[in-house]
Image: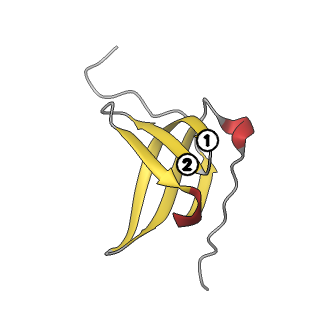
Amino acid sequence: MAARLVIAITTADIGARITTRRRDPEGFRDAVGILESWADGVLRVRKRDGTLVEIAEEMLVAAKVVPAAPPRPGRK
């Protein structure tokens, strides 16, 4: 059974935690984080480490909303 790649997010999901997969010259890249904005064909995703990833809409091959990250051990 082959996996289906689906883009299941919209601009209404700004502020939600998402996972993305995008085409890259070397294959595919994934990013998980908060969708900060989606304007002029570019998604901006803030990863847990604070890095801002910019993804061109035409490079996006899959995306969906995911639950909040589980707490890290030893942190409150």
| Residue located beneath label 2 in the image | 42
Residue 18 at what x, y percent from top left?
A: 55, 44
In the figure, residue 65 lies in which quadrant? top right
Amino acid bearing label 1: Trp
Relative height, residue 22 to residue 38 (above, below): below
| Mark 1 → mark 2, Cα distance in angstroms | 6 Å
Whether residue 60 can be seen here: no
Q: What crowding class fits label 2: few (fewer than 14 Cα within 10 Å), some (14-19), or many (20 or more)?
A: some
Q: Quadrant of the N terminus?
A: bottom right
Q: Quadrant of the C terminus?
A: top left
| Residue located beneath label 1 in the image | 38
72 to the left or right of 39: left
Element type at marker 1?
A: strand
At horizontal 74% and vertical 37% (from top left) the residue drawn is 12
Amino acid bearing label 2: Val
Which residue sits furthest front? 40
Q: What crowding class fits label 1: few (fewer than 14 Cα within 10 Å), some (14-19), or many (20 or more)?
A: some
67 to the left or right of 10: left
User: Mark 1–mark 2 contact, CB under 8 Å?
Assistant: yes
At horizontal 28% and vertical 27% (from top left) the residue drawn is 73
54 to the left or right of 12: left
Element type at marker 2?
A: strand
In the figure, residue 27 lies in which quadrant? bottom left
Which residue sits furthest bottom? 1
Residue 32 at what x, y percent from top left?
A: 45, 46
At horizontal 64% and vertical 74% (from top left) the residue drawn is 4
Q: Nearer the viewer, residue 12 or 64?
A: 12
Which residue sits furthest left? 74
Whether residue 48 can be seen here: yes
At horizontal 68% and vertical 37% (from top left) the residue drawn is 13
Residue 52 at what x, y percent from top left?
A: 38, 37
